[in-house]
Image (spheres, rainbow, N blue to C red):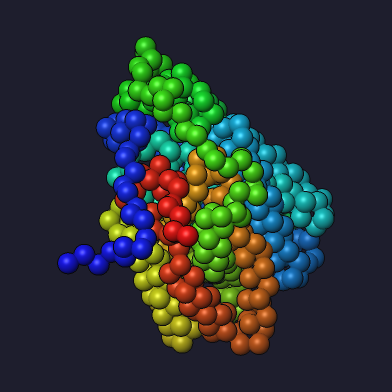
Amino acid sequence: MSTANPALPPILPTPASALSKTLDSIGFTRVQAAVIALLMAGQFFDSLEQNSTGSMGPLLEESLHIGNSSLTLINTATVIGGLVGRMIGGYIADRWGRRKALSLNLLVYTLGGLISAAAPDYATLLTSRFIVGIGLGGEFTVGLAILAEVVATRHRGSLLATLNVSSGGIGNIASFGFFALVLGTLGPILGGDHTSWRWTYVILALPALLVVLFRRYLPESPRFLLAKGRVDDANVCLTRLASGSIRGLRNAGPTKEFVTEDDIIVETGRTSYVEVFRGRNLRSTAVVGAASWMSFGAQVTLLFLMPILLESRGYSLSQSLVYTMVMNIGSLFGALAASYLAGRLPRRTTVSVAAVLGCVAALAFAAFADGPAEIMILGAIFQFFTMMLNTMLSVWSPELFPTNIRAMGASVVNGIGNVAGAVMPFAALFFFDHAGVPGVFVMIAGMYVLLVVASRFGPETFGRHLEAIDAPRPALPA
């Protein structure tokens, strides 16, 4: 017996467009793998920079004669710069193209990194970290937008999650190992505590230029091109994607006709940030934005404060960095787990379960993490669920918005998390001053409880073509 409500109009399935059918038939080839590799390279540098201030904290404090509050402000400047960068990058991506936005990001990042290395005083360093944040801000969300639009529906969730495998997984592990090597073992060779942090900024900035050169071959999103009415350019990009060969990124041969004028994507709203906060988009922005605040705020707080928290328990800087590096093995497995689950389970279910288990892990760390073994094991477990959460939210965000505001919508949702990353470390310092390390983790556990509540109101996007998600919903009868 049917349980449908006869008072409501039926929601008919939206047929896949010619574009989605083409992408689904292409599947996953070496071309898509190359696109992902170019995007992951940017995420890797993002992760190194995100962890740099906390890792170099004691050296910066000694060299620039600043305290914990001033150090936290450096992190805040980077995070706020990231918020500005996400907003600018998202607008450029939706107005002029995903490729153009990505080509600018790492150039700005490199400039900021070199200024950081030469900073003569605290004010200059603070300004340079803001510039670095601008450069890296749009990297992640624009990468999510373009990747969501160039892969098959069945692979979309898993492949979107791979970006966090690079940044939150491999990047977090490598970053603390890198900082332990450069600031510890190589520190005396680089001039000691007062100059080794400067060379670290140089080493972080220069390789990004190589990524910029290779990104010349990154294809534009055919979905963006169709939304702009550029059918011929969309067919060129689809021909490159369908070539199945890395050489196809440079020259795929004669252009094939995959889409026609009939496949142009007609958007009802403007390409404007106002649209992110209107109608059905407002619900997506509010729900997933709140979840991002809790999840990203908890992650940044932990990554930034962990070396400081461990030093407060008597561990040296080198020990603190090594312990934090080991903990972040959990981040890698958390991102990998999210990549596996994103292709198999609904978004709401995965986010809710990961948040509940993350809450339990935070409380366990607060109660039982006393010795080195307990710190590393419980810390790795906590990082596992933290990264699973952040990865699932990053998969979810570009699926929620139509093509004309996809990058901007993802930028706003993730930007809310950026604001949390700027604010929550200050709150964590308050709890740390009054209740020590356990107080910080109790605060994080409370954030995860709120995350579970928020995620239950989000629209489900698992397994659906992007045009099915974008399709207008039937109005209720008068």
Q: Tell me where residue 364 sits by quadrant.
A: bottom left
Q: In this view of the protein, can residue 315 be seen by the observer?
A: no
Image coords of residue 201 (percent x, y): 65, 48
The relative height of residue 367 versus residue 20 in the rendered view (above or below) is: below
Which residue is pictured at 66% across the width and 57% down the height? 79
Q: Residue pushed farthest left?
A: 1
In the orientation shown, which residue stands out farthest toward the top? Answer: 254
Q: Quadrant of the N terminus?
A: bottom left
Please report the residue visible at 58 percent of the width from the left and 42 percent of the height from the top. Answer: 269
Residue 321: percent from left, percent from top: 53, 65
Q: Is residue 353 above or below residue 32?
A: below
Total label count? 0
Q: Is residue 407 left or right of residue 245?
A: right
* 53 relative to 201, above or below: below
442 or 447: nearer the viewer:
447
Residue 137 location, x and y as percent? Answer: 62, 48
The image quarter containing residue 23 is top left
Q: Residue at x 46, y 67 (%)?
A: 457
Instruction: Residue 440 in the image: state x and y as whole percent.
Output: 57, 79
Vertical arrangement, residue 353 with respect to residue 115, above or below: below
Considering depth in this image, is 467 or 406 the residue closer to the camera?
A: 467
Residue 114, visible in the rendered structure: yes
